[in-house]
Image (cartoon, helix red, strand yellow):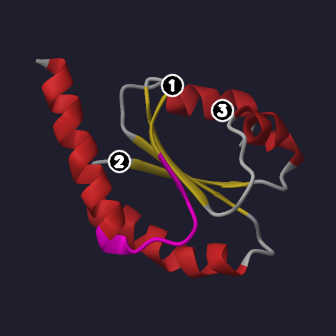
Amino acid sequence: MTATDFDKIIWRDALTFVDFFATWCGPCQMMHPVIDRFQEKMNGRVDVYKVDIDDRDMLEIVHRYNIMSVPTLMFFRRGEVLWRESGRIGYDHLTNVLRELEQREQVGQR
């Protein structure tokens, strides 16, 4: 993925979840099964992407969003950051955040 690809992804109407991680990060590795399960169970409700902060092609994005610790998890829609949290979180918390964002977005579209 390049910075241009990233911008195209987050500027869509679809709700997009991004996991900023590093291969050397223990908590990131522990989050991968949670995120994989989230992606599988949400089945199209949200698009899920993983961004390695050490990928040189992604340095501009890492700096733009001031990613200082990993994992950093973010939801986007139409280029807007709707939610952001750093550190390990559970599957239930992640699904609750998605549900809240969907409800908030529906209210905003009326």
Q: Vertically, is 87 above or below 5? A: below
Asked whether residue 43 appears in the rendered view, the answer is no
Q: Quadrant of residue 106?
A: top left
Q: Quadrant of residue 94?
A: bottom left
Task: Provide the residue designation for mark 2.
Answer: 46
Q: Vertically, is 89 above or below 21? A: below
Residue shown at 53% from the left, 72% from the top: 88
Q: Vertically, is 22 above or below 5? A: below
Q: Quadrant of residue 63?
A: top right
Gap in Å between the C-alphas at discs 2 and 1? 15 Å
Side (left or right) of 83 relative to 57: left
Task: Provide the residue designation for mark 3.
Answer: 5
**Which secondary structure, mark 3?**
helix
The segment highlighted magenta reads 84-92
Side (left or right) of 64 relative to 91: right
Q: Quadrant of the C terminus?
A: top left
The three-letter code of the residue at mark 3 reads: Asp
The three-letter code of the residue at mark 2 reads: Val
Sooner in the amino-acid sequence: mark 2 or mark 1? 2
Task: Provide the residue designation for mark 1.
Answer: 79
Sooner in the amino-acid sequence: mark 3 or mark 1? 3
The three-letter code of the residue at mark 1 reads: Gly
The stretch drawn in magenta includes residue 89: yes
Q: Are marks 2 and 1 in contact (CB under 8 Å)?
A: no
Label 3 vs label 1, nearer the camera:
1
Gap in Å between the C-alphas at discs 3 and 1? 13 Å
**Which secondary structure, mark 1?**
loop
